[in-house]
Image (cartoon, rainbow, N blue to C red):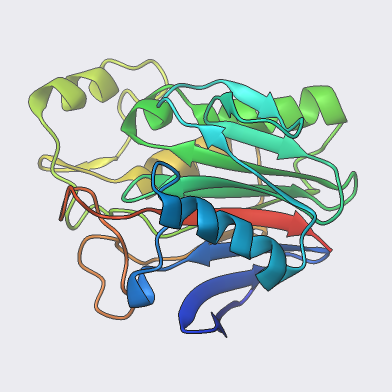
Amino acid sequence: MDIRSIYIDKYEFLEIDMGGAAAVFSTAKNNLDFNKSKDVGIKNIENLKKWFELKSIGYLNQVHGNDLIVYKNKVEDGDAIFTNEINNAVGVFTADCVPVILYDRKNRIIAAVHSGWKGTLNLIVKKAIRKLKNDYKSTEDDIFVCIGPNIQSCCYTVGEDVIDKFENSVFYRGKDIFIKNNLNLKKCIKYQLQSEKIKNENIKFIDVCTFCSSEYKMHSYRKDKNCGRMFSFVYMK
């Protein structure tokens, strides 16, 4: 699963071919913004239909929880969204949190997961994979995962309250996820994937820090609270 940059008009996206599905991660190049509370954000979401030849775009009112939603052509509260419809994209908004794309190649199911520190603490990626296994009969061999740009351990200093929550978690207790007061969300998610026996060769990380990347322009809430939002989405071809 190789990463390539694609340009649409003046905007840059990072795309990964997952074999029958495409995972796409927007950047902030030329101020591309998907903040759905703004007119420009709604306009850009609609533009995705034209840019990527899609029938619809599914997204959520993200609440930093762990509710898993099957897309039914309406906006619901939740932090993971699933569909098995061809040319219907599902995606999540981020500006430091971790966007995680899931794809079952055999049963043709896709999902997009929003995993901030709260969702990561509550194992939302693990729960999304369990939903694939329980509701769609997915197996670990058939599930492919792409983890998009997020604030990485180089820049993600958290408070003692967050550290205590992770260190007192049954799942994370004793695991190597901190460097001093810096939380490594990538490692947290990797531990969740390992617990569900997802193969390493089925996992692709885009190692781009939203806070300090010099290679790509990214929105970062921690760096600039008035920032826009990236949109990470997946669709089946």
The quadrant where residue 107 appears: top right
| Residue 174 % position (x, y) | 30, 27
Work out whether residue 125 can be spotted.
no
User: In the image, is residue 229 above or below residue 173?
Assistant: below
Residue 140, percent across and down? 75, 41
- Compared to residue 141, the image places residue 123 above or below, namely above
Q: Which of the two residues, 167 or 55, is positioned nearer the viewer here?
A: 55
Rendered view: 212 above or below 146: below
State the count of labels.
0
Residue 224, quarter of the rendered image = bottom left
From the top left corner, tell me how far across and down residue 194 is, in percent.
56, 40
Report whether 17 appears left or right of 13: right
Task: Identify the image quadrant of the N terminus.
Answer: bottom right
Q: Nearer the viewer, residue 145 or 212?
A: 212
Q: Is residue 193 rendered to the left or right of residue 178?
A: right
| Front-most of residues 122 and 196 | 122
Please give the name of the residue rendered at 42% of the width and 25% of the height, measured from the top-left corner: 63
Quarter of the image that includes the C terminus: bottom right
- Which residue is at the front of the view, 63 or 183? 63
Residue 210 in view (yes/no): yes
Q: Position of residue 37 (x, y in %)?
A: 40, 41
Identify the residue shown where x is 18% and y is 20%. Answer: 164
Residue occupying the point 33% across, 70% down: 31
